[in-house]
């Protein structure tokens, strides 16, 4: 009897120290470590010339990583029920952040886009937390009104109206990449919640029509699309290379130089001012050049493992009827999926050039901290589900 009691006590203690899905944790840790190395390699030259310190961006990224870990640790301790209670507050927080960016003198303009808020110790890209806040709100809304959303046109349109305001503000910045990621996440959550297929198809067609309208309304966007279509058939066409397709041409040169196994860590030529934003939007191209396409495929495998586990966490909750954590996990997984697809597409010329960071790998505090917070939420969803299975009420209640 004593042995049985000891065994039960050991298992109970082990359950209490369950931190979350191992595959998800390991994949994120590997991406963070690899990203730190490659971001540093990609930024050494520009950091040295602009700041007099070759490791300037490494130091900044380490500070952001510590900030992200602190924020993620705090979020990890919060019970999920609080997010449902705060859904309206988070909706207004998302709208307020995006509105502040558009206020003259408050928002900071970089490369023709006004997307940042100066916090003194860092610049916050408002779209990063706003996307997460909107996903939390939509998850809460779908969990409360799932039947209404799936059974009537009014219910179908209602969540879209909530998303319309932040999308309009993102377009005013402009931040078309964030719009696509947010729409992908919301549409995906609605589809997984049970929206009828024909409604979903109609939604995609309307979004496509809206996107076409936005492109045709701007000569700059029309030029970008024309350059992209030309680049698909001839990426080194003179009009492309010396026009809006310059970054794409340089990124493709990086992939070509790297071949399968790369030219060696630190030996990139493209990061020497040939490829703009090499340490942010185009860090994948530098990975391809220095470590080869094999390394790019390994990075993508880590992302796939991470997103797959996030989807499985969502699926577990959905099967049990815990719809809020399920939809929230789906939404977060879709944010990551959208950003990875767009960034990889831009780096390889499969999508028009668009400024969007690669999660965990690109330089930037807003993206890194938000990504780490989203991981913490996924782990919290997983441990609460695990606690319910093992009747650990203390974990659930925080």
Image (cartoon, helix red, strand yellow):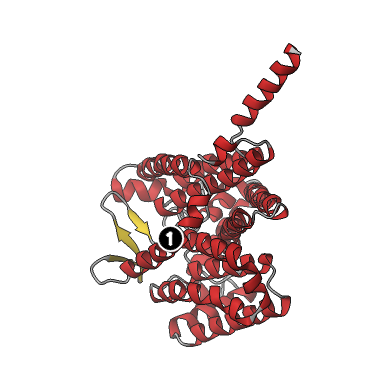
Give how far across and how far down residue 216 sits, in percent.
Answer: 50, 87
Depth check: give the residue in front, 129 or 44: 129
Classify residue 287 as left or right of residue 52.
Answer: right
Q: Is residue 5 above or below residue 357?
A: above
Give how far across and how far down residue 209 sits, in percent.
Answer: 58, 85
At x 61%, y 33%, the residue is 18
Q: Quadrant of the N terminus?
A: top right
Classify residue 241 as left or right of residue 231.
Answer: left
Q: Secondary structure at mark 1?
A: helix
The residue most toward the front is 1
Residue 276 visible in the picture: no
Give how far across and how far down residue 385 sits, in percent.
Answer: 64, 44
Residue 56 visible in the picture: yes
Q: How many marks?
A: 1
The residue most toward the left is 105
Depth check: give the residue in front, 218 or 145: 145
Q: Quickly name the residue at label 1.
A: 90
Q: Is residue 222 above or below residue 92?
A: below
Specify the quadrant of the image occupied by residue 174.
bottom left
Structural crowding at the residue carrying mark 1, measured as other residues with C-alpha within 10 Å and reported as few (<14), some (14–19) or many (≥20)? many
Specify the quadrant of the image occupied by residue 329.
bottom right
The residue most toward the top is 2
Q: Is residue 19 above or below residue 171?
A: above
Give how far across and how far down residue 376 sits, in percent.
Answer: 52, 45
At x 31%, y 67%, the residue is 100
Depth check: give the residue in front, 182 or 328: 328
């Amino acid at each position: 009897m004593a042995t049985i009691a000891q065994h039960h006590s050991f298992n109970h203690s082990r359950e209490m120290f369950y931190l979350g899905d191992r595959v998800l944790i390991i994949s994120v840790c590997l991406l963070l470590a690899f990203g730190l190395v490659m971001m540093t390699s990609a930024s050494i030259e520009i950091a040295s010339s602009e700041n007099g310190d070759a490791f300037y961006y490494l130091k900044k990224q380490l500070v952001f990583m510590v900030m992200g870990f602190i924020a993620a640790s705090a979020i990890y301790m919060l019970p999920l029920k609080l997010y449902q209670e705060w859904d309206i507050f988070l909706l207004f927080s998302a709208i307020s952040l995006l509105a502040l960016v558009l206020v003259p003198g408050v928002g900071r303009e970089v490369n023709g886009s006004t997307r940042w808020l100066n916090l003194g110790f860092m610049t916050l890209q408002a779209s990063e937390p706003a996307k997460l806040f909107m996903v939390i709100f939509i998850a809460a809304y779908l969990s409360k009104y799932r039947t209404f959303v799936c059974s009537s046109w009014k219910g179908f349109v209602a969540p879209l109206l909530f998303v319309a305001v932040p999308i309009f503000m993102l377009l005013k910045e402009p931040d078309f990449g964030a719009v696509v990621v947010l729409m992908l996440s919301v549409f995906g959550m609605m589809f997984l919640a049970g929206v009828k297929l024909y409604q979903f198809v109609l939604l995609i067609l309307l979004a496509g029509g809206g996107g076409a309208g936005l492109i045709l309304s701007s000569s700059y966007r029309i030029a970008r699309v024309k350059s992209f279509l030309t680049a698909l058939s001839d990426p080194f066409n003179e009009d492309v290379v010396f026009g809006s397709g310059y970054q794409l041409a340089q990124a493709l040169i990086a992939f070509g130089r790297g071949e399968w196994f790369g030219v060696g860590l630190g030996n990139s030529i493209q990061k020497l001012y040939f490829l703009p934003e090499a340490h942010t939007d185009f860090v994948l191209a530098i990975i391809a050049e220095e470590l080869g396409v094999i390394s790019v495929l390994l990075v993508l495998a880590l992302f796939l493992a991470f997103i797959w586990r996030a989807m499985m966490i969502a699926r577990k909750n959905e099967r049990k009827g815990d719809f809020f954590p399920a939809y929230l996990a789906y939404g977060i997984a879709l944010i990551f999926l959208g950003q990875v697809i767009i960034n990889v597409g831009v780096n390889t010329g499969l999508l028009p050039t668009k400024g969007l960071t690669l999660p965990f790998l690109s330089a930037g505090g807003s993206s890194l901290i938000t990504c780490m917070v989203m991981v913490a939420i996924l782990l919290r969803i997983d441990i609460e589900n695990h606690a319910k299975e093992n009747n650990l009420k203390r974990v659930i209640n925080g």
